[in-house]
Image (tube, rainbow, N blue to C red):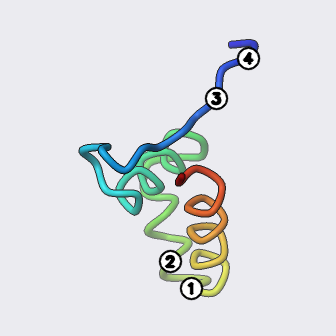
Amino acid sequence: MPGASFMVSPQTAIPMYEQFIELTNQIFWEGYAEQLAKENPARFQLELSDFMNTYQF
Protein backbone atom coordinates (compact mmCIF):
# COMPACT_ATOMS: atom_id res chain seq x y z
CA MET A 1 0.00 0.00 0.00
CA PRO A 2 1.64 3.24 -1.08
CA GLY A 3 1.79 5.78 1.68
CA ALA A 4 0.68 3.30 4.33
CA SER A 5 2.43 3.37 7.67
CA PHE A 6 2.33 1.22 10.75
CA MET A 7 2.00 3.29 13.89
CA VAL A 8 1.10 2.10 17.36
CA SER A 9 -0.76 4.34 19.75
CA PRO A 10 -0.73 4.07 23.55
CA GLN A 11 -4.39 3.06 23.39
CA THR A 12 -3.64 -0.05 21.35
CA ALA A 13 -5.27 -3.13 22.87
CA ILE A 14 -2.36 -5.47 22.09
CA PRO A 15 0.85 -4.71 24.00
CA MET A 16 3.89 -3.77 21.90
CA TYR A 17 5.68 -7.04 22.64
CA GLU A 18 2.76 -9.07 21.32
CA GLN A 19 2.52 -6.85 18.25
CA PHE A 20 6.22 -7.40 17.59
CA ILE A 21 5.81 -11.18 17.85
CA GLU A 22 2.78 -11.13 15.56
CA LEU A 23 4.44 -8.90 12.97
CA THR A 24 7.70 -10.86 12.80
CA ASN A 25 5.78 -14.13 12.54
CA GLN A 26 3.81 -12.67 9.62
CA ILE A 27 6.93 -11.35 7.87
CA PHE A 28 9.02 -14.48 8.31
CA TRP A 29 7.25 -17.61 9.57
CA GLU A 30 5.15 -18.73 12.53
CA GLY A 31 7.47 -19.17 15.50
CA TYR A 32 10.26 -16.99 14.07
CA ALA A 33 10.30 -14.55 16.99
CA GLU A 34 10.35 -17.31 19.59
CA GLN A 35 13.14 -19.12 17.73
CA LEU A 36 15.18 -15.92 17.45
CA ALA A 37 14.71 -15.21 21.17
CA LYS A 38 15.97 -18.69 22.01
CA GLU A 39 18.86 -18.90 19.53
CA ASN A 40 20.04 -15.30 19.59
CA PRO A 41 18.63 -13.34 22.54
CA ALA A 42 20.79 -10.27 21.88
CA ARG A 43 19.52 -9.99 18.30
CA PHE A 44 15.93 -10.51 19.46
CA GLN A 45 16.32 -7.72 22.03
CA LEU A 46 17.84 -5.43 19.40
CA GLU A 47 14.99 -6.12 16.95
CA LEU A 48 12.36 -5.61 19.67
CA SER A 49 13.95 -2.34 20.81
CA ASP A 50 14.15 -1.10 17.23
CA PHE A 51 10.48 -1.98 16.69
CA MET A 52 9.39 -0.20 19.86
CA ASN A 53 11.50 2.90 19.14
CA THR A 54 10.19 3.09 15.59
CA TYR A 55 6.48 2.55 16.13
CA GLN A 56 5.71 3.89 19.60
CA PHE A 57 4.79 7.53 20.03
- Residue 3: give its label: 4
Q: Mark 4 belongs to which amino acid?
A: Gly
Label 1, on which residue?
Answer: 41
Q: Secondary structure at mark 2?
A: helix
Task: Please identify the quadrant where the N terminus is shown.
Answer: top right
Q: Secondary structure at mark 3?
A: loop
Q: Mark 2 belongs to which amino acid?
A: Ala
Which residue lies at the image location 31% right of the left edge and 56% below the top edge? Answer: 15
- Gap in Å between the C-alphas at discs 3 and 4? 6 Å
- Gap in Å between the C-alphas at discs 1 and 3? 28 Å
Which residue lies at the image location 54% right of the left edge and 38% below the top edge? Answer: 7
- Residue 37: give its label: 2
Look at the picture and state if 48 lies above or below 8: below
Look at the picture and state if 5 lies above or below 25: above
* Label 2 vs 3, first from the N-terminus: 3
- Gap in Å between the C-alphas at discs 2 and 3? 26 Å
- Gap in Å between the C-alphas at discs 1 and 2? 5 Å
Counting from the top left corner in percent of width and height, residue 19 is at 41, 50
Pointers 3 and 4 in contact (CB under 8 A)? yes
Q: Secondary structure at mark 4?
A: loop
* Label 1 vs 3, first from the N-terminus: 3
Quadrant of the image occupied by residue 44: bottom right
Counting from the top left corner in percent of width and height, residue 35 is at 49, 70
Judged left or right of residue 41, residue 8 is: left
Q: Mark 1 belongs to which amino acid?
A: Pro
